[in-house]
Amino acid sequence: MEKNKNLKEIVIKVEGEKWEAALDKAFKKANATAKIDGFRPGKAPRSMYEKNYGVQSIYSEAMNTLLDEKYKSIITEEKIFPIIEPIVNIVKIDEEGFEVNIVLVTEP
């Protein structure tokens, strides 16, 4: 069986300092509008934010920001022209980083 030439799979993996920096940035952005008793917006410590809103919201924001940047650079550098929205499958996301598989349908 012949592999579909219009499908392209991309694996994006981010860990280490880049992930830590993205988490910090995501926390600051989310904390700026968070309503936590006893704290002005943007002034709550991260532990209080995570207790009230969960750590997943920070992971999600950080991953979306990095994924957007990496996706744009990959399609620009490799001259890929997707014709529909990509299919994004999250393989892993935790305090150490994330890994995502993206399936693109390109022009024939």
Image: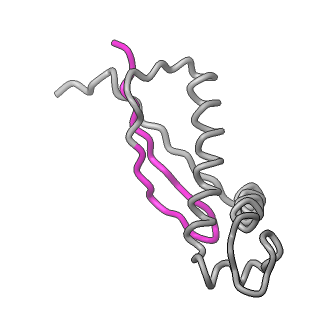
Q: Which range of residues does the magenta coloring cover?
A: 88-108
| Residue 102 locus on image (x, y percent) | 44, 41
| Residue 5 locus on image (x, y percent) | 32, 21
Front residue of 32/20: it is: 32
- Answer with left or right where residue 105 lies relative to residue 78: left
Instruction: Give the answer, above or below, for where 21 lies relative to 87.
Output: below
Q: Residue at x 61, y 82 (%)?
A: 52
Determine which quarter of the picture holds residue 30: bottom right
Instruction: Give the answer, above or below, for where 88 lies relative to 29.
Output: above
Instruction: Give the answer, above or below, for where 4 lies relative to 56.
Output: above
70 magenta-colored: no
| Residue 95 locus on image (x, y percent) | 63, 71
Determine which quarter of the picture holds residue 9: top left
Q: Residue at x 73, y 68 (%)?
A: 31
Front residue of 72/31: it is: 31
100 magenta-colored: yes
| Residue 80 locus on image (x, y percent) | 50, 20
State the colouring used for the structure image: one colour
- Answer with left or right where residue 18 lies relative to residue 68: right
